[in-house]
Each structure stands twice: as structure tokens, then as C-alpha cells.
Image (spheres, rainbow, N blue to C red):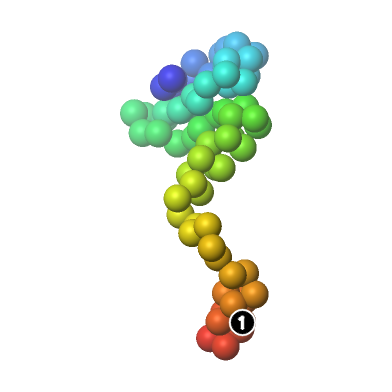
Amino acid sequence: MIVTSTEVQNNFGKYLDLASGQEIIITKNGTAVARLMGIKKKEKSLASRLVGLVPVDVDEDAIKAERLTKQ
């Protein structure tokens, strides 16, 4: 859902309730400036972005050692 900052200011309670079930993009002068979302939704969203990015057979110790040698 996309709403203006004025609309959110005037009806904050309504959008706070809606944010628990969906993401709300807040615009100012036609430009997206903020995102309002429930905590549970955010956790799911962030976790879903990581799927497929990290290989299953990652050796964390090897990655740490490699990172330390680069410093």
C-alpha cells in the first residue's frame, strides 16, 4: 500500500494496525521516503531475502580466516 505522509499523520492508528499485515510505503511530494511494516513481517522479509544467497556447504571458520588475512 502506498500513502502520503499527510494521510499517515492524520490517521496514524489506522496505518499502524494495517502495518501488522502488510507493508506500507509512505510518500512525500510523490517520492517514497519511508516504509512501515510489522515486526513479524520484517523478519520474514529479511529472511526470505537471504534464501539462496548463502551456499548450504559454507565453512564459517574458513570465511573468518580469509577475512582476517585480508585486514
Query: Is 65 placed above or below 27 here?
Result: below
Residue at 40% across, 34% down? 32
**Rendered location of residue 40, percent (x, y):** 64, 30
* Foreground pick, 49 / 62: 62
Q: Residue furthest front?
A: 57
The residue positioned farthest toward the left in the image shown:
30
Residue 67: which quarter of the image?
A: bottom right
In-image side of 30 versus 19 (left or right): left
Image coords of residue 5 (percent x, y):
48, 24
Residue that numbered label 1 is attached to: 65
Query: Residue at image x 45%, y 36%?
Result: 33
Look at the image and tell me whether residue 28 can be seen: yes
Which element carries disc 1, helix, strand or loop?
helix
Q: Amino acid at mark 1?
A: Ala
The residue at 49%/16% (across/down) is 7
Please rate how many residues cluster around mark 1, counting C-alpha atoms within 10 Å: few if below 14, some from 14 to 19, many from 20. Answer: few
Residue at the spot x=59%, y=77% of the render? 62
| Image height of 13 relative to 24, above or below | above
Tell me: residue 53, above or below residue 12. below
In the rendered view, does 62 fall on the left or right side of 54? right
Image quadrant holding the N terminus, namely top left
x, y percent for residue 60 = 62, 69
Is residue 71 in view from this perspective?
no
Residue 7 versus residue 1: which sits nearer the camera? Answer: 1
Q: Left or right of 65: which side holds 2?
A: left
Pinpoint residue 71: horizontal percent, then vertical percent.
57, 86
Residue 47 appears in which quarter of the rendering? top right
Between 50 and 18, the residue placed more toward the observer is: 50
Decide if residue 61 is on the left or right side of residue 29. Answer: right
Q: Disc count in the image?
A: 1
